[in-house]
Image: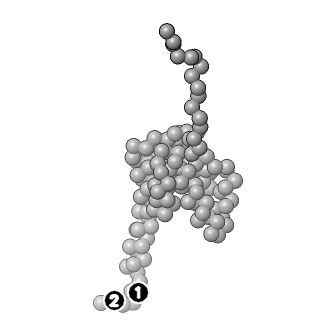
Amino acid sequence: MDQANPSAAPGIFGMFFWLIAALLVIAGLWKTFSKAGKPGWASIVPVYNLIVLMDIAGKPWWWIFLFFIPLVNIVINILVSISVAQAFGKGTGFGVGLAFLGPIFYCILGFGDAQYQSGTTTETTAPIPNQYPPNQA
């Protein structure tokens, strides 16, 4: 039994775990971006993928700077994830899943049946009144 380097095995397994997680995120984001009418390759370009994600979420582009502020980045990630989920017709719980379990939930979003609804908003608007009065005989 060789005990010269006992931590070598967990390092290899850890590397494969993170590699698989990264590939899942890239695949899920690629499909999600494509569904939203954005270029899929944007998912592999650092910083630009955040700009595209802000566009899908309906948030201003400068919010990417908030991702670099400790603790604030956690709140911003949750808010952006919820907005992305709502842009695809999903609820707040799905958005929290996107924030904390991204590799799984972005694959569900990208490869699932969710459709991007551009220009969605969480506000309700009043119905447009009928322009013509009903026929009265």
Label 2's element? loop
Count of labels shown?
Answer: 2
Q: From the top left corner, tell me how far across and down residue 20 is, in percent.
A: 41, 62
Q: Quadrant of residue 131?
A: top right
Left or right: 77 in relation to 115: right
Residue at 59% x, 37% y: name it: 125
Q: Amino acid at mark 1?
A: Asn
Q: Which mark is residue 2?
A: 2
Do we see residue 33 in this rendering? Answer: no
Q: Which mark is residue 5?
A: 1
Q: Which mark is residue 136?
A: none
Residue at 67% x, 49% y: name it: 60
Residue at 64% x, 70% y: name it: 70
Q: From the top left corner, tell me how far across and down residue 107 is, in percent.
A: 42, 53
Q: Quadrant of residue 3?
A: bottom left
Left or right: 99 in relation to 65: left
Label 1's element? loop
Q: Amino acid at mark 2?
A: Asp
Q: Are marks 1 and 2 in contact (CB under 8 Å)?
A: yes
